[in-house]
Image (spheres, helix red, strand yellow):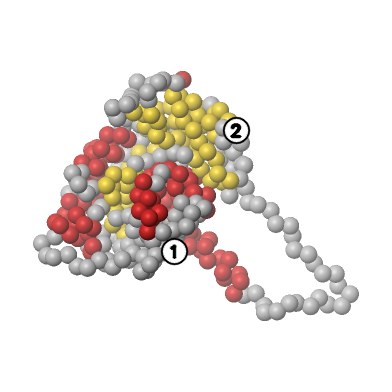
Amino acid sequence: MQTPIHKIVLPFLLALLAPAACLAQAPEGPISPNSGVAVQRPPAQSRIKVQVSLVNTPAVVRNRKGEMVTNLDAKDFQITDNGVPQKITHFDLGTDPISMVLLVENSSRIAALLPQIRKSGILFTQTVLGPTGEAAIVSFNDSVDKLQDFTRDTAAFEGTLAQLPQGTSGAKLYDAMAASVEMLSARPVPPGEKAATRRILFILAESIDYGSFARLGEVLRRAQLANITIYAVGLSTTRAELQAKHPPETQTPITPPGTFPNPPFPGSIQTPDTAAERQGVDATALAVWVVQHAENVVKGEALKTAAAATGGEHLATFKDRSIEKAIDEIGGELHAQYNLSYAPSDNTASGYHDISVTVDRKNLQVRSRPGYYLP
């Protein structure tokens, strides 16, 4: 049974529209005070403080060969928050249960890939979720629909995905991400196990968006505060065209003529040359910039940015990596991932909080979330 987007992200949209509604009701022109009555001054504006009680920081450690290292202990890790050392309060290696939303594009543009997606349910239940995980399914095209609420019933999950319908040609990716983040944020925390559940947003989609109300930067802010890690398998329209039985239709450019799909480097002017250089941009640095500014300036890079902002991974499916192989790789990582948690010593300071996770052994690389933003 499908649930329309207004039932999933209504609180998210109301928060965005409320200021406009208030402005629409304001009277025109200045208001003259009554004679002999002192003018009432507006109350002083105060910044809304958000307190973070616990920060979950999943970390993947690899050696020089790219192999995952799984023999570390909590004492081997050091975490700083805005440069201040933090005490690790929870440590686990790949066994904490997973609460996942599978966000899947079902637009007509990737129709040739839908049969593969429909068959992938068993990979998610056996390779990604494990025996204790729960998952929901959300699809998107011109609309965002909840196809399956959170369940531990593997047959129900696999059956829902097997019946994934084909939608229209739209791609409201950011609205769909906002809906998924809200669903995961609302999941209850088990008593006495404040850090025990890993919240995962797993996206199967192209990295483009058409017509969303939500802004990517704001969605990623909420994901970071809710300790949600985003993994993405980037679907390729080109691959879908090659697999289709009919000639591909002409694709509509995602940006107007004379404009560029990607943002320029901060402080630079956008030109064809600098746009080409953007292909090698540091995804983590871009993710931090997008979160700090709550912007939508990463067309063509949205999935990479989302994964980098939350400590997850983005895998493309063009070339020699299939959808099935990508899902299997991510599942393997999730079950060899260190889950570290800490209660930040300065949990109300507004602005961006940089997180650094390091290990005291040589020749090892750590991938974790870069930080979070407090309004």
Asked if one can make out residue 291 in the rendered structure from this viewpoint, the answer is no
Q: Is residue 250 above or below residue 135?
A: below
The circle on residue 213 is 1
Q: Nearer the viewer, residue 6 or 321?
A: 321
Q: Residue furthest front?
A: 273
Per the image, label 1 sits on a secondary structure element best described as loop
Say which amino acid is labelled 1.
Phe
Q: Which residue position holds label 2?
A: 345
Q: Residue at x 29, y 44 (%)?
A: 315
Q: Is residue 161 left or right of residue 364?
A: left
* x and y percentages locating residue 94 in the rendered image: 34, 30
Neighbourhood count class around disc 1 (C-alpha, 10 Å): few under 14, some 14–19, many 20 upward: few
Q: Earlier in the sequence, mark 1 or mark 2?
A: 1
Q: Which mark is residue 258?
A: none
- Cα distance between the residues tagged 1 and 2: 35 Å
Image coordinates for residue 126, horizontal then vertical, percent = 23, 38
| Amino acid type, label 2 | Ser
Residue at 35 percent of width and 49 percent of height:
279
**Badge 2 density bin: few <14, some 14–19, many ≥20, Cα 10 Å:** some
Residue 115 visible in the snapshot: yes
Q: Please give left or right for residue 241 compared with residue 226 in the image.
A: left
Q: Position of residue 317 (x, y in %)?
A: 23, 48
Q: Residue at x 60, y 33 (%)?
A: 345
Examine the image and state in which quarter residue 229 appears: top left
Q: Secondary structure at mark 2?
A: loop
Closer to the camera in the image, 352 or 97: 352
Q: Nearer the viewer, residue 59 or 103?
A: 59
73 above or below 300?
Answer: above
Farthest residue, direction left: 245
